[in-house]
Image (tube, helix red, strand yellow):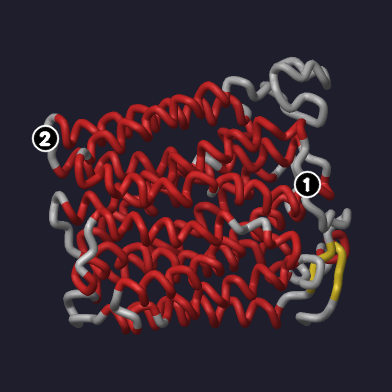
């Protein structure tokens, strides 16, 4: 089955569980089992085992984002490897690297294994985004992407629930949990390789570097998204451990609330994107993030408590979940052969700031943590101004409000 090539039209005759959308769902479930578990344990693991401070955690996340910056390498790899195969191999790599994380409990070891798992994660995400936009019908993409977010949140929820229920009860070790979670992801990736045929997209993808002037707004939004998200990913959970003394099961319980909220909300978010359009949804996201980041800063400037911090963390995640509207915006303005190379370019652009921001802000964090979140609010403000440039009905030739291209239908 793994070596059978079949078109998307022919795939409609396959049993439901072997169709492309189901494979996307399987991968959406497999990735968080390893990544979410790694993320839940990370801050406690590095603080307890390696004595990390804000400086070291900043360097770790800088190293973690280097493969994202180099995601443009996917363009070279798909010359020799089919995208679907590359995505599953990258998912397998993420699983294996996660499984052996606890075997290297030193700064150098943690940075090395983080680099390897990050290569798997970022190359998987790059290819996965490309496959989603190629395999999903444009009219149904927002709703399906919403369901895929819900599936990923559900997988994370199960992983976190098990972690909360068993961590203290059975006195689990970091090594055991990493081995099990990473191993499951690796096994699912291997099984998916053999159980699914190779799906052929309707139009072949360009295998060259693509950087088009008419995609400039998409590139700018991606760059700001990457810079802003780094502050949340690196410092929000770290704050819960460093400032409020959260233990593993407490951090994980917070993540459970997060993903339960996402499971419920994501399908409705997909419908919202389809109904209101990318412009309005992204503007709503960025306004919400400005408020959340300013409130994060208030925790340090005004001494606000842990209940507010936990609430903000959940709201933060919900707003970030709306980011798939950026994918559907690009799907509407893109030439189909551009999707794969542009996904790689966009991931690289998304990680330009990610390579230097965590390390630089790590030093700022030890001096003035609140200012880090104030900076994030400013970044969300820039994103809001960029989102205002998205037309109500984006399309080829109507990429921005300044394009004056395709006439938009009446609302």
Relative to 185, does residue 68 appear above or below in the rendering? above
Residue 27, quarter of picture? bottom right
Q: Which of marks 2 and 1 precedes in the sequence?
A: 1
- Which quadrant is the C terminus positioned in? top right
Provide residue 42's location: percent of width, then percent of height. Answer: 31, 65
Q: In this view, does 141 lie to the left or right of 370?
A: right
- Which quadrant is the N terminus positioned in? bottom right
Residue 35, quarter of picture? bottom left
Q: How crowded is mark 2: few (under 14 residues within 10 Å), some or many (20 or more)?
A: few
Q: Nearer the viewer, residue 342 or 281?
A: 342
Q: In this view, does 78 lie to the left or right of 286?
A: right
In the rendered structure, find residue 210 and report the number of the disc placed on it: 1
x 75%, y 54%: residue? 340
Q: Is residue 357 left or right of residue 51?
A: right
Q: Is mark 1 on a helix, strand or loop?
A: loop
Q: What element carries label 2?
A: loop
Q: Nearer the viewer, residue 1 or 316?
A: 316
Q: How crowded is mark 1: few (under 14 residues within 10 Å), some or many (20 or more)?
A: some
Q: How far apart are marks 1 and 2 (CA)?
A: 48 Å
Q: Nearer the viewer, residue 78 or 31?
A: 78
Provide residue 183's location: percent of width, then percent of height. Answer: 46, 82
Relative to 252, does residue 239 appear above or below in the rendering? above
Residue 387, quarter of picture? top right
Provide residue 283's location: percent of width, then percent of height. Answer: 51, 26
x 64%, y 46%: residue? 346
Provide residue 233's location: percent of width, then percent of height. Answer: 38, 50
Q: Mark 2 — residue?
A: 303
x 81%, y 31%: residue? 396
Viewer-nearest of discs 1 and 2: 1
């Amino acid at each position: 089955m793994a070596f059978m090539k079949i078109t998307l039209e022919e795939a409609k005759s396959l049993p439901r569980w072997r169709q492309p959308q189901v494979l996307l769902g399987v991968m959406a479930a497999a990735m968080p089992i390893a990544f979410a578990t790694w993320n839940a344990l990370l801050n406690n693991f590095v603080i307890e085992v390696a004595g990390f401070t804000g400086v070291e955690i900043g360097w770790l996340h800088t190293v973690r984002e280097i493969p994202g910056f180099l995601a443009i390498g996917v363009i070279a790899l798909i010359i020799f490897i089919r995208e679907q195969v590359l995505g599953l191999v990258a998912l397998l790599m993420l699983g294996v690297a996660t499984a052996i994380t606890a075997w290297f409990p030193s700064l150098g070891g943690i940075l090395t294994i983080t680099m390897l798992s990050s290569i798997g994660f970022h190359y998987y995400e790059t290819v996965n985004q490309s496959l989603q936009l190629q395999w999903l019908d444009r009219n149904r993409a927002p709703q399906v992407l919403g369901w895929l977010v819900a599936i990923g949140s559900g997988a994370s929820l199960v992983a976190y629930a098990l972690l909360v229920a068993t961590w203290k009860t059975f006195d689990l070790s970091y090594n055991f949990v990493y081995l099990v979670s990473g191993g499951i992801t690796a096994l699912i990736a291997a099984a998916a390789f053999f159980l699914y045929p190779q799906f052929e997209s309707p139009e072949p993808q360009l295998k060259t570097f693509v950087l088009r002037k008419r995609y400039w707004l998409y590139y700018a939004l991606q760059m700001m998204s990457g810079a802003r998200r780094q502050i949340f990913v690196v410092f929000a959970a770290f704050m819960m451990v460093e400032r409020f003394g959260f233990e593993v099961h407490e951090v994980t319980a917070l993540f459970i609330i997060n993903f339960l909220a996402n499971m419920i909300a994501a399908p409705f978010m997909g419908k919202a994107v389809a109904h209101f359009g990318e412009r309005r949804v992204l503007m709503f996201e960025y306004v919400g993030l400005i408020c959340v980041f300013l409130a994060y800063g208030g925790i340090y400037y005004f001494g606000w408590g842990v209940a507010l911090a936990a609430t903000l963390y959940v709201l933060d995640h919900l707003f970030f979940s709306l980011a798939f509207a950026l994918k559907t915006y690009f799907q509407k303005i893109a030439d189909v052969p551009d999707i794969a190379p542009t996904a790689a370019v966009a991931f690289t652009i998304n990680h330009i700031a990610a390579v230097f921001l965590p390390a630089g802000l790590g030093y700022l964090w030890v001096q003035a943590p609140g200012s880090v979140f104030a900076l994030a609010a400013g970044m969300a403000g820039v994103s809001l101004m960029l989102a205002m440039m998205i037309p109500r009905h984006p399309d080829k030739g109507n990429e921005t409000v300044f394009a004056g291209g395709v006439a938009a239908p009446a609302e």
